[in-house]
Image (cartoon, rainbow, N blue to C red):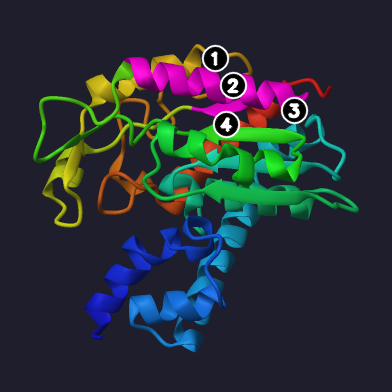
Amino acid sequence: MNEEEKGILEQYLLPFLHLNKRYPLLQGKSLEAEAMLSGLDVDELRVIRSNMKQNAKQAALELLKEDEIVDILDKLPLDGSECIVVLGDSITEDEQGWFEILKNVLAIATEKEDFTFINSGVAYNTSADALRRIDRDVLIHEPDWVFVALGTFDAQRLNIAPHRTLMPLSESWENFETIQQVINEHVSNPVIWITPAPVIKELLSEHPLYEFGIEEEDLSQVRQLVSGKDGVIIDSLGGRMGEEGPEAWNYIPDGLHHSLTGHMNTVRLILKKMSEAKRT
């Protein structure tokens, strides 16, 4: 494998590849299986994973240098013992993504912390995919707080069938409604909904790895559905990646997944909105 191929793996596959999430009954060590699948040896993969974790921690440390973030942390409805779970897609599963950055922020900033963080993001999940696994991936952990970060892949239009979105809007509505009902039955704190951020469709459509496109018109309708749910809503207008529209530095080159700066934008909004939420 040459350096260019390894770079593609590091950017577009490995952050979103965790076989134990897709195949919970898979026998053996997932790191070894992932290394074989990606054409790396285990030590190479371990170094790459370590670097991504370090990137997430460094992003958290950068956020903790901001006075506004430090002030907000004292207002969070958390005591350091909570189980926090997120149900999401690849933007969430990202090993150096917003949930991993948030985890580091809270762990570093909380004295005597004993949090449990469960990242139940699975790459390219639609709301239907996530609903199917909500029991084993979310409820089984008896969470105190649940984030839901879905909808981006409901809005995709396959290149072979561009006349429709993969998930009809009515079905997305029903899925979000059911997700809310199920979580509310088991979790006392309000659901924290993270709306799907815009994509840079020109970059996405030109990227050879993807067989779909996403139109802002479709995505904004999904965003409205999410924003209409009960609970804490993060970024109802979808402006966190740029006030005048999505800015390229907040994304990796596919225009879909977020860079560290883009993920940090999400974390800022989460902390702000959580500081306004009441603990139950």
**Which amino acid lies under the numbered mark 3 shown in the image of this protein?**
Val
In magenta segment, residue 187: yes
Assign the C terminus to one quadrant of the image.
top right
Residue pictured at 35% horizontal, 76% vertical:
38
Q: Do the residues under discs 2 and 1 have CB atoms within 8 angstroms?
A: yes
Give the labeled residue for mark 1.
Answer: 229
Q: Is residue 36 above or below residue 239?
A: below
Quick one: SS at disc 3? loop
Q: Is label 2 or label 4 in front?
A: 2
Disc ID at residue 269 = 4
Which residues are drawn in magenta?
A: 170-194
**Which amino acid lies under the numbered mark 2 shown in the image of this protein?**
Gln
Q: Is residue 71 left or right of residue 7?
A: right
Q: Is residue 40 left or right of residue 161?
A: right
Q: Is residue 280 above or below residue 268?
A: above
Q: How far separated are the C-alphas under marks 4 and 1?
A: 17 Å
The x, y position of residue 130, in whole percent, is 48, 38
**Which amino acid lies under the numbered mark 4 shown in the image of this protein?**
Leu
Residue pictured at 30% horizontal, 73% vertical:
7
The x, y position of residue 264, in whole percent, is 52, 45
